Image (spheres, rainbow, N blue to C red):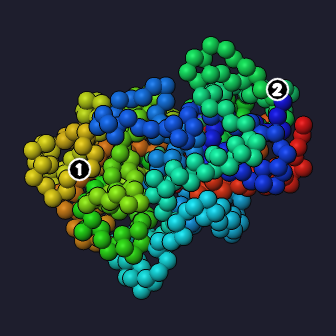
Amino acid sequence: MKYDLIIVGAGPSGIFTALELKRRKPNEKILLIEQGKPMGKRNCPKDITKNCINCRPFCSITTGFSGAGAFSDGKLSLSPEVGGDLPDLIGYNYTQELIEYTDKIYLEFGADDRVEGVEAKEEIKEIRRKAIEAGLKLVDCPIRHLGTEKAQEIYQKLEDFLIDKGVEVRFNTQATDIIVEGRVIKGVVITDSLKKEKYEEVYSDTVVISAGRKGADWVKSLCVKHNINHRAGTVDIGVRIEVRNEVMERVNNILYESKLIGYPGPFKDKVRTFCQNPGGVVSQENYDNNLAVVNGHSYKDRKTNNTNLAILSSHNFKDPFNEPIKYGTKVAELLNMLGDGKIIVQRYGDILDGKRTWAHELSRSNVVPTLPDAVAGDITSAMPYRTMTNILNFIEALDIVVPGFAGTETLLYGPEVKFYSNKVEISKDFETNIKNLYCLGDASGWTRGLMMSSLMGVRMGQILEERGHSTF
Ligand SMILES: Cc1cc2nc3c(=O)[nH]c(=O)nc-3n(C[C@H](O)[C@H](O)[C@H](O)COP(=O)(O)OP(=O)(O)OC[C@H]3O[C@@H](n4cnc5c(N)ncnc54)[C@H](O)[C@@H]3O)c2cc1C
């Protein structure tokens, strides 16, 4: 079977590649390969079981149509400053233009037209003044909040649209290798994700790999096997913080999400806030290697009494060790071991008092954990000294911007680890050093968010049209 284009991975970057190319060239014969299920069949049994049951072969939270976007908070960050390094590749102003273009597509498919963090200019100035006093930088980033349930509706419409326009979407199908002849791409080897009995070759002169964080290890193995240029990325290690909405009310109302960056002493590493969820819930994600990591999201209508956000400390390595993913995995494994495979939660006051947290202490707090199966324990026994010091000093600084943030009852959940993919070396047209093989989105190491991965897909569709696709 030969196609004009094969896309591996139906996350936002893959979806928007297909969408943009189909709109520009309706007759293109496109195959979209996804190892997970269609949007409507993705569900997390935790709603019923209450505990994560480690679904096999894949966790529905990160796998299936719309990739990691389906159960995300659906926050579209409308600034080139957020979501990865793509502006370094294609330019800041051009990235801004593409954000506006891609945002319109989300609106067309039903996104809320409200944008958070653009009104209340005087109040934002006041928050910035306090951030400066605390030695932190406040990043301007308007947010369009889809909400988890709305994001799923929007991605369902996108799935229907693509299928209606003739894109062949093969679900439960995993790409296992690429076919390369003389440094030119020729196709992809695929198999049934569940049975993995028979292997089939599908052919195209153009292949886009958009396999997300989920496919990062696979992409790394392709890089090694086929000599695709790449380099080690960064790992961000930290905790998810949860406080009562009352503590964050002002910032939530004015900005929705406060993106703050600092370089606290004594190490001066980059530490930042990430993924703030007003009225949200803390959630657990399981990677295929059984690693349990914490995350968070919020529904558009079902609000809780708490706000959660991550505090992440960036780690880079050079010599003699340069495997950030391995480092982050070891830290997460240690925390998982202390939590008996579960996420650990600890009160800030207990950390300062040098003690673990006990379940009965949590039950008398104002802040009731929204991740009920997290176990009370001691994060400090597993978190590296440097990371823990960065986090604690950052929390103290944040307390100046948000009084009460460093309260006794503030909850810290761990591990929150962001494993970014190795950075694949690509041209401005996203082409690797294998002719007509493109790498996009989180799998490429150039993006780390919904808007950036979506717009990279949009741009990919445009590039393919500009290059006079089709090749068939
Ligand atoms: C819980 C959670 C909440 C998040 N919240 C936000 C948020 O609010 N705002 C934000 O900007 N970002 C958020 N993110 C990040 C965002 O979802 C990702 O950055 C984005 O989805 C990346 O898009 P992508 O297309 O690059 O990859 P992905 O969305 O990861 O999609 C990749 C797809 O490829 C498939 N795949 C992988 N390997 C193969 C293979 N070998 N064969 C076939 N298929 C394969 C996977 O199953 C997956 O469906 C969140 C992520 C998570 C996990």
Q: Which mark is residue 6?
A: none
Q: Position of residue 65 (x, y in %)?
A: 58, 41
Image quarter of residue 380: top left
Position of the N terminus by quadrant: top right
Q: Helix, strand or loop at disc 2? A: loop
Image quarter of residue 173: top right
Position of the C terminus by quadrant: top right
Per the image, the residue denoted by label 2 is 1
State the residue in front, 396 or 215: 215
User: Which amino acid type is marked by label 2?
Assistant: Met
- In percent of the image, x 36 and y 69: which residue is there? 252
- In percent of the image, x 49 and y 60: which residue is there? 146
- In percent of the image, x 38 and y 35: which residue is there? 45
Whether residue 256 is visible here, answered yes or no, is: yes
State the residue in front, 254 or 40: 40
Q: Does the closest atom of ligand 1 sit within 8 Å of the Cβ of label 1?
A: no
Within 10 Å of disc 2 (Cα), the crowding (few <14, some 14-19, many 20+) is: few
Q: Helix, strand or loop at disc 1? A: loop
Per the image, the residue denoted by label 1 is 369
Whether residue 230 is visible here, answered yes or no, is: no
Q: Is residue 335 left or right of residue 13?
A: left
Q: Does the closest atom of ligand 1 sit within 8 Å of the Cβ of label 2?
A: no
User: Which amino acid type is marked by label 1?
Assistant: Pro
Lower position in the chain sequence, tag 1 or tag 2: 2
Image quarter of residue 242: bottom left
- In percent of the image, x 34 and y 40: which residue is there? 47
Q: Position of residue 102 (x, y in %)?
A: 66, 61
Q: CA distance from mark 1 to mark 2?
A: 52 Å
Above or below 397: residue 312:
above
